[in-house]
């Protein structure tokens, strides 16, 4: 479909984004807020923003997405949104009764200049926030950064509002998982638990956006980090922030605010990154890696061994968010594959360098801050054997006839991604199963009848 | 019993003796989990299906990202409408204005794709920073010699309905541009289909009916439409308005300016689609057309009705809840559900008006709950109270139904089979049957069933 609309020649563009590889900040803030138990996200802006974010998250997670909106009108846009927000806070507590309201802004409320902390203070002073209930916020102007920034800002807001210190260190580690699936968060917790380590993982959307079917629609499923637990994050011995873009702001705030030392590292995607993650857990907690985890590593390695001859030299294009792309690129290189086009829509100061460091100084690749239109052009100029990206990648995959693996956000046309992890050793195993499946399905599709063999 | 906010009590109506009129067309309560959208959303869904036009969204990336190929409006030819174009405004643009960027983007895009017309959608922030979109469009139109139409769809300036209006204004300007052009057509029976967006190919089905009746459809507004057709549509003898919420203002305008009468119809359900076709035939009052129409309706009903009765056997007596965007669709759904033996216990819309709700009352049975601009908490409460087995709605409602352990049918953008026309009624029966009778509910049955 895009075929006839995407010319091969790449022209310089400044004023125009075609087929984006990003979306706006508020949706990230909304997703992060679901990782707090009993939290109702609140969009301070027009109704449409909230409706769009809820629809997009519903399509990706296949779960009820409950969020409120200030329902801006022409009046609030002229006179400011204070009245709307105060009224919202009052209505939300009286009818939806959450523990926390997590307010994020929109381009509209940012541009008219609403001062959210001041409005929250006023609501508090006026007795609109019941005892034991909380209102937190993050500024998420839609015209800067991307959805990943919105996520990072809301996670940072959680720290700013909740972390406390008693000066007594608790033998626990904070883990900020980054924008990953609920199933990934579950897996990260499992790995730490398997190693016998007490963790506070936040945000934690497992049990919220992969909640079981119970025959009941509950507003606040049982998952999500508890406020009481989050408060103790200021007493943890360390913070592990997974993914520089999504997780480092909150980790740094914990460091400066409560003197919790932070370790910012990549998402544990693939063998090497998971090794580093497990190692960080081991050294910080002062524990040994249990045999069960070593065995998982061994199984992943065994699978790679069995598969390596299929992977050698395969060219790959990938697009998505910087933290995921860095992890995925490293894993692909580990597998002896060749990532040649890597495109993100999310601005990041270190992205290009991080990817180039993984590839090595002599390896050339197209690493761009751009959109999927550009990615398509790059592929037309140098074709690939495999494409990784969110659902929107399927247009390119179809036009160029490339095997395609759905990865990242949003995935609107498949079900299951939110349950099964792609992080950790087990996640790595799942990823390579998908990769080999995609490559061999294609090989079989293209085989002549004589060459269509039983064993590949 | 469902929890209803004090302020919302008048927007919920229980059909019992002496029930008052419902309150509607009210701004949503701040802080409610409303299922409503914004002005931009309204404009975007109405204009989106025009396949050979350029649709450029002027604002930060989000508005373009969330509406990229999400409409499900099929095209039989060009697919320019499925590409996402955004000026992707950043902080500096917000401070210094985005007019230059808009102009540059428009020029580049028109040169590259040579569209027949361009629509430029203003999003919230444009209304605040005050870009003069109108004059940028004028300049581009003059230089490139195609219609470049600003769509005043700043999100906060009303609700989805106001977006429909903004879209209709843009459509009117497009059709009014070259008024003096001649129109040659041998067929004396010409119509426009209004308010059908060719979701899952529905416009194609409806067009085929009219063709069989001997009637010429100049254009569908806007399902699978082209700019040149729209420019000619003022020559039609009659406008057939479906989804009146989105297109009524344009139909009225076309009546006022070009003297084209309109009729309101619906293509959902056997009764309504038959009625729609007969109304059109009766308007032209031509013997051949009438005969052809009778033949069409008879043969289609003969074809589908026995199959529908099969589904009805299984569905008889089951209960449904309907929550949709426009109220007009809700009438048809109530009737269509009746055809398959089901009773609608709860019915509501995001944007219905007083007239709509009066009609809804007439077709709804005793005890039905009618809701305006409801929220998930109320909705799930009513569903429990009424012991409903299927919810019919849109993307945000689907997971609620599933979590409650009941069936769901998408009657919005995400329908994947045509639900309009005679075949659509059969598809609808099949969809309802397949979800209500799914074995999965044996294990996940809600506590109330």
Image: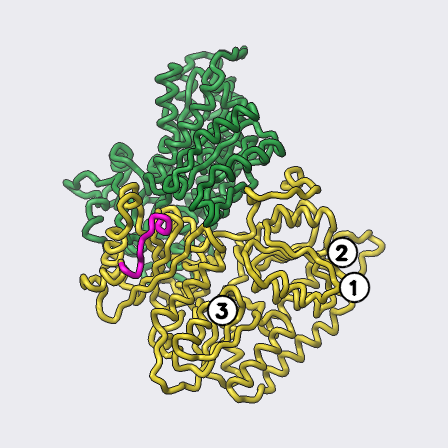
Chain colours: A yellow, B green
Residue at horizontal 46 percent and vertical 72 percent from the top: A251
* Chain on which label 2 sits: A
Closer to the N terminus: mark 3 or mark 1? 3
Asked if the stretch drawn in magenta spans residue A201, the answer is: no
The residue that mark 3 highlights is A248
Any magenta on residue A110? yes
Cα gap from disc 3 to disc 1, whole angstroms? 44 Å
A323 up-or-down from B54: above or below = below
Label 3 to label 2, Cα distance in Å?
44 Å
User: Which mark is on residue A444?
Assistant: 2
Which residue range is magenta in the image?
A: A109-118
Q: Is residue B362 left or right of residue B300?
A: left
Q: Position of residue A62 (x, y in %)?
A: 46, 57
For marks 2 and 1, the one nearer the N-term is 2
**Residue at the image point whose x is 52% and y is 69% from the top:** A184
* SS label for mark 2: helix
Residue B77 visible, this orientation: no
């Amino acid at each position: 479909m895009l075929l006839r609309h995407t010319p091969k020649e790449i022209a310089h563009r400044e004023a125009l984004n075609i087929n984006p590889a990003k979306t706006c900040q508020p949706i990230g803030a909304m997703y992060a807020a679901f990782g707090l138990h009993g939290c109702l996200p609140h969009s301070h802006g027009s109704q449409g923003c909230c409706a769009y974010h809820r629809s997009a998250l519903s399509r990706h997670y296949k779960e009820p997405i409950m969020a409120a909106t200030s329902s801006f009108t022409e009046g609030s846009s002229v006179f400011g949104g204070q009245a709307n927000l105060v009224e919202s806070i009052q209505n939300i507590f009286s009818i939806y009764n959450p523990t926390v309201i997590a307010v994020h802004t929109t381009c509209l409320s940012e541009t008219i200049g609403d001062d959210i902390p001041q409005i929250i203070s006023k609501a508090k002073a006026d007795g609109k926030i019941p005892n034991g209930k909380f209102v937190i916020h993050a500024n998420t102007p839609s015209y800067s950064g991307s959805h990943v920034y919105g996520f990072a800002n809301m996670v940072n807001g959680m720290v700013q509002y909740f972390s406390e210190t008693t000066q007594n260190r608790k033998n626990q580690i904070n883990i900020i998982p980054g924008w990953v699936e609920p199933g990934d968060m579950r897996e990260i917790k499992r790995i730490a638990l398997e190693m016998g380590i007490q963790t506070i993982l936040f945000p934690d959307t497992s049990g919220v956006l992969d909640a079981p079917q119970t025959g009941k629609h509950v507003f606040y499923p049982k998952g999500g980090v508890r406020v009481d637990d989050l408060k103790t994050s200021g007493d943890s011995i360390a913070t592990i922030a997974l993914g520089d873009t999504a997780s480092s702001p909150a980790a740094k705030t914990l460091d400066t605010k409560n003197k919790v030392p932070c370790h910012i590292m990549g998402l544990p995607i693939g063998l090497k990154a998971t090794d580093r993650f497990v190692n960080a857990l081991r050294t910080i907690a002062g524990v040994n890696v249990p045999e069960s985890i070593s065995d998982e590593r061994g199984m992943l390695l065994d699978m790679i061994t069995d598969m390596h001859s299929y992977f050698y030299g395969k060219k790959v294009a990938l697009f998505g968010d910087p933290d995921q792309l860095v992890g995925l690129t490293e894993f692909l290189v580990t597998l002896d594959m060749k990532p040649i086009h890597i495109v993100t829509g999310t601005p990041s100061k270190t992205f290009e360098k991080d990817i180039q460091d993984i590839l090595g100084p002599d390896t050339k690749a197209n690493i761009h801050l751009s959109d999927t239109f550009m990615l398509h052009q790059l592929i037309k100029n140098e074709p690939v054997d495999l494409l990784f990206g969110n659902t929107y990648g399927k247009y390119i995959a179809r036009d160029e006839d490339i095997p395609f693996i759905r990865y990242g956000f949003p995935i609107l046309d498949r079900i299951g991604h939110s349950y099964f992890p792609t992080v950790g050793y087990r996640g790595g195993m799942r990823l390579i199963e998908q990769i080999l499946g995609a490559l061999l399905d294609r090989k079989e599709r293209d085989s002549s009848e004589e060459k269509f063999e039983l064993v590949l | 019993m469902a929890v209803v906010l004090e302020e919302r009590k008048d927007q919920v109506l229980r059909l019992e003796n002496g029930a008052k009129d419902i309150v509607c067309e009210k701004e949503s309560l701040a802080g409610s989990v409303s299922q409503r959208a914004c002005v931009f959303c309204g404009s975007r869904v109405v204009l989106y299906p025009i396949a050979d036009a350029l649709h450029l969204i002027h604002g930060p990336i989000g508005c373009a990202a969330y509406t990229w190929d999400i409409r499900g409006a099929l095209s039989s030819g060009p697919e320019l409408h499925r590409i996402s174009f955004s000026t992707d405004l950043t902080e500096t643009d917000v401070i210094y204005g985005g007019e230059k960027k808009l102009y540059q983007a428009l020029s580049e895009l028109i040169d590259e794709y040579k569209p027949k017309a361009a629509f430029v959608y203003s999003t919230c922030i444009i209304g605040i920073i005050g870009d003069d979109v109108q004059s940028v469009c004028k300049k581009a139109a003059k230089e490139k010699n195609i219609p470049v139409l600003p769509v005043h769809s700043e999100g906060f300036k009303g609700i989805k309905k106001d977006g429909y209006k903004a879209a209709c204004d843009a459509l009117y300007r497009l059709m009014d541009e070259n008024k003096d052009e001649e129109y040659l057509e041998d067929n004396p029976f010409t119509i426009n289909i209004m308010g059908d967006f060719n979701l899952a190919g529905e416009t194609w089905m409806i067009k085929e009916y009219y063709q069989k009746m001997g009637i010429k459809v100049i254009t569908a507004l806007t399902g699978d439409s082209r700019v040149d057709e729209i420019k000619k549509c003022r020559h039609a003898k009659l406008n057939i308005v479906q989804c009146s919420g989105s297109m009524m203002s344009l139909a009225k305008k076309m009546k006022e300016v070009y003297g084209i009468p309109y009729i309101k119809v619906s293509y959902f359900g056997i009764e309504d689609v038959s009625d729609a076709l007969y109304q059109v035939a009766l308007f032209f009052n031509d013997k051949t057309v009438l005969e052809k129409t009778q033949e069409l309706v008879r043969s289609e009903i003969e074809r589908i009705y026995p199959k529908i009765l099969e589904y009805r056997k299984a569905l008889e007596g089951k209960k449904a809840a309907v929550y949709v965007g426009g109220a007009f669709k809700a009438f048809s759904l109530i009737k269509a559900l009746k055809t398959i033996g089901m009773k609608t216990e709860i019915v509501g819309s995001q944007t219905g008006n007083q007239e709509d709700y009066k009609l809804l009352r007439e077709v709804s049975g005793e005890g039905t709950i009618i809701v305006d601009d409801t929220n998930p908490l109320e909705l799930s409460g009513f569903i429990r109270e009424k012991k409903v087995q299927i919810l019919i709605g849109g993307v945000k409602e689907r997971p609620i139904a599933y979590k409650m352990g009941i069936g769901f049918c998408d009657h919005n953008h995400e329908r994947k089979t045509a639900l309009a026309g005679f075949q659509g009624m059969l598809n609808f029966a099949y969809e309802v049957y397949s979800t209500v009778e799914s074995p999965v509910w044996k294990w996940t049955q809600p506590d109330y069933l």
